[in-house]
Image (cartoon, rainbow, N blue to C red):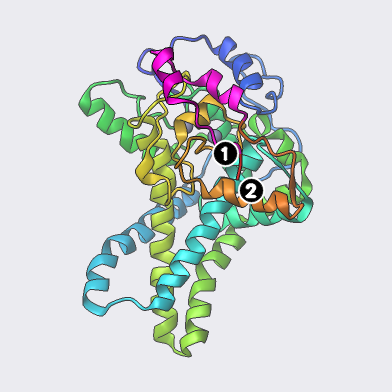
Amino acid sequence: MTIDPGVAQGSTSEGSRDREAATADGVPPPAPAPDAGGPEQPAGPSATLGGERRGSPEQVALFLFITLPFVALIAAVPFAWGRGVSWLDLLLLAVFYFIGCHGITVGYHRHFTHGAFKAKRPLRIALAVAGSMAVEGPVVRWVADHRRHHKHSDAEGDPHSPWRYGETVPALAKGLWWAHVGWMFDREQTPQHKYAPDLIRDEAVRRVSRQFPLWTAVSLLLPPLIGGLATWSWQGALTAFFWGSLVRVALLHHVTWSINSICHAVGKRPFASRDRSGNVWWLAVLSCGESWHNLHHADPTCARHGVDRGQVDSSARLIRWFERAGWAYDVRWPKSSRIEARRVRPDRDSEEREGASVVSAG
Ligand SMILES: [Zn+2]
Ligand SMILES: [Zn+2]
């Protein structure tokens, strides 16, 4: 994908951004880049079905997987109004929502993309599977896109910046749509061998990544199976599919995508970052703590994003439990000195009067 030079924000040169990203984001340094202008040659096994460019059948499948749940989400309100919704269906929705959401936030994002903690083998694989069940793409592709986002955040090369088209209101409206969902239809894919060589080398992760269609099927079929068996009726299976599969996937999709769109357009920016990421409090519960996005861009390898008092971050809580169980280790919990060094201080004296209030962990 290319962004027209000049329309994207930021003035740092590509070369210095590369060096900065490799050290600041905790992302493994990218593989040596091929000569400018030459195609990037993937070496070794592929971690996703399909190549670096998406073909038409894949585009159609993507379109259906995005629109069908969304239609269900829109239909959910009149549907619930007329017929009501059972406690079982609501429970299925909530349970599968938070499994997929934490699979993305704890697994795909904090563990696989940023290495905020190390995970023992069974947990690592379970996180890759749980993340796949969010139906947001195979783990290796997701990680490659997200590392590219951090490397170029809100500048040329960012796969999903809402500032892509400029800063006027119509340009931002168009950019928000692009950052929310439009970017996924870009046929050109982030080169996975360049951005996620560490994951491709891991055979188990590579396998889960290639099994993405299987985990999508499991994610969509488990709720109706449970609903059907629990009520012993086809009707129960159907409503469980509607609420537990379609509505749940649509809700999770739009909350995740809001981190790319809303959290790069609005929100408070208490920390210094070289992009426009903001902390958006009203998305904190549904996004499992990911909407403290300004802190995340200021300190990408930190295992906790909601570092200030009262900032809900269920993903950090879960990582704490994994650590206590001995499944997660080398967790990069926020250090007070590191966090305070990143805090924007227009008036240092008044800040000091209020006192620092960093939550250290769990
Ligand atoms: Zn971001
Ligand atoms: Zn990130």
Front residue of this view, candidates 59 and 156: 156
C-beta proximity under 8 Å, tags 1 and 2: yes
- Is residue 162 something that shows in the picture? yes
Q: From the image, which quarter does the C terminus lie in?
A: top right
The structure residue drawn at horizontal position 76% and vertical position 51%, both measured from the top left corner, is 204
The structure residue drawn at horizontal position 65% and vertical position 28%, both measured from the top left corner, is 27
Determine whether the residue tagged by mark 2 lies in a helix, strand or loop.
helix
Residue 263: x percent and y percent? Answer: 39, 35
Residue 230: x percent and y percent? Answer: 50, 85
- The amino acid type, in three-letter code, at marker 2 is Ile
- Is residue 51 something that shows in the picture? no
The local crowd at label 1, few if under 14, some if 14 to 19, many if 20 or more residues have their Cα within 10 Å, is many
The local crowd at label 2, few if under 14, some if 14 to 19, many if 20 or more residues have their Cα within 10 Å, is many
Q: Is mark 1 within 8 Å of ligand 2?
A: no
The structure residue drawn at horizontal position 40% and vertical position 29%, both measured from the top left corner, is 161
- The amino acid type, in three-letter code, at marker 1 is Arg
- Using residue 280 as the reference point, say whether residue 305 is left or right of it: right
To which quarter of the image does residue 284 belong?
A: top left
Front residue of this view, candidates 336 and 26: 336
Q: Which tag, 1 or 2, sits closer to the chain's start?
A: 1
Determine whether the residue tagged by mark 1 lies in a helix, strand or loop.
loop
Front residue of this view, candidates 49 and 347: 347
- Residue topped by disc 1: 304
Residue placed furthest toward the front: 353
Residue 312: x percent and y percent? Answer: 47, 46
To which quarter of the image does residue 181 belong?
A: top left
Magenta-drawn segment = 335-360
Residue placed furthest toward the bottom: 232
Q: Is residue 73 magenta?
A: no
Q: Residue 319 carries which label?
A: 2
